[in-house]
Image (cartoon, rainbow, N blue to C red):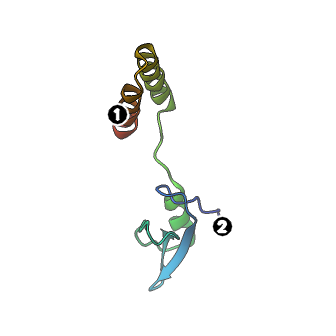
Amino acid sequence: MDKLKPCPFCGWKAILHTHHSKIYIGCANDKCFTFMHLFETDEEAIESWNKRARVDLENIADHLIEAASEAFEHQDRELLIKSLEECFNNGK
């Protein structure tokens, strides 16, 4: 059986659960409330839980370089923070 990746939202340990002969995985952090739908097998549940969205690192790197260059040029910390928020919130 594959090892479970940590919760993609808070980083806590994930736990495999059984509910009426179905399998699901949830976050161990009782303040996170992350869990997934039911599966027939442990393997299906683990494979689904361990999938992560593909991140376009080249695009993120380009945007970070551009944002950092502009912010440092103007010595503007707030501009850098705003650019970083836009980068991560818009999936750039």
Q: Residues within 10 Å of mark 1 (few under 14, many from 20)?
A: some
What whole-number distance in Å separates the C-alpha atoms at marks 1 and 2?
38 Å
Residue occupying the point 50% across, 81% down: 18
**Could you say where residue 29 lies in the image, as x and y percent from the top left?**
50, 69
Residue occupying the point 42% across, 22% down: 67
Secondary structure of residue under mark 1: helix
Splitting the image into 4 quarters, where does residue 19 fall?
Answer: bottom left
Residue occupying the point 34% across, 33% down: 86
- Above or below, 91 against 2 in this view is above
**Could you say where residue 25 lies in the image, as x and y percent from the top left?**
50, 70
Name the amino acid, label 1. Glu
Q: Residues within 10 Å of mark 2 (few under 14, many from 20)?
A: few
- Above or below, 16 against 68 in this view is below
Give the labeled residue for mark 1: 86
Give the labeled residue for mark 2: 1
Name the amino acid, label 2. Met
**Could you say where residue 65 lies in the image, as x and y percent from the top left?**
48, 21
**Left or right for 55, reference 13:** left
- Above or below, 29 against 83 in this view is below
